[in-house]
Image (tube, rainbow, N blue to C red):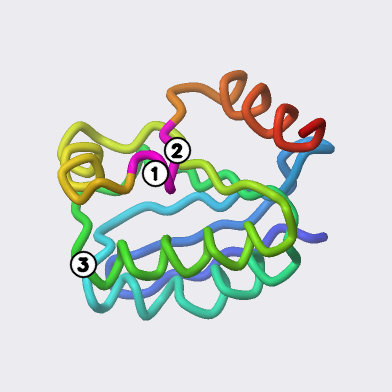
Amino acid sequence: MSNFTTQGMMMQITISEFGAVGTKITLIGKLDIAGAETVDLPLATVAGTRRNVVIDMVGVDFIASIGIRHLVMAAKAVARGSSKLVLLDPSPLVTEVLVTAGLDDFLPIVRSEDEARAVLAGAANA
């Protein structure tokens, strides 16, 4: 798969390989209504491959309920393929929103690429 980048007004999304274990999606910007619209199709497309997905959220400084909804829908699609979706290093603010919403079990948060690999390798061996 070739690298793919699209840039909306505020949200930038880059899709790349994450070693042999899955696909990495890097998000930079605000995951508000406009940001969610920008990531909707590429996120759904990657989730539809039912491979493991790592969403690098270190560059996301804001998340709205619509953004959370897109992450949950992607995680559900990935889970249907017995794969896993993990969030890589969301900011303290975004982490707090996800934890407060009770989604940190469904959308596991990892703090490093090594931790992401370990979690995804576990999913592959489960």
Provide the secondary structure element on which disc 3 rests.
helix
Of 13 and 51, the residue lying toward us: 51
The residue carrying mark 1 is 57
Q: Please, what is the three-letter code of the amino acid marked with disc 3?
A: Ser
Q: Residue at x 28, y 63 (%)?
A: 31
Disc 3 and disc 1: Cα gap in Å?
16 Å
Residue 108, magenta (yes or no): yes
Secondary structure mostly seen in magenta is loop
Q: Amino acid at mark 1?
A: Met
Closest to the observer, 23 or 118? 118
Picture quadrant where residue 57 is located: top left
**Residue underneath mark 2:** 108
Instruction: Specify start and end residues of the magenta stretch as a single range.
Output: 104-109
Q: Which mark is residue 65?
A: 3
Q: Residue at x 50, y 22 (%)?
A: 112
Of tags 1 and 2, the one toward the viewer is 2
Position above or below: 28 against 104: below
- Find the distance from the CA under tag 3 to the CA under tag 2: 17 Å
Tell me which numbered mark, 3 or 2, is placed earlier along the sequence: 3
Q: Earlier in the sequence, mark 3 or mark 1?
A: 1
Residue at figure coordinates x 74%, y 29% from the top left: 121
Q: Along the polypeptide, which appears first: circle 1 or circle 2?
A: 1
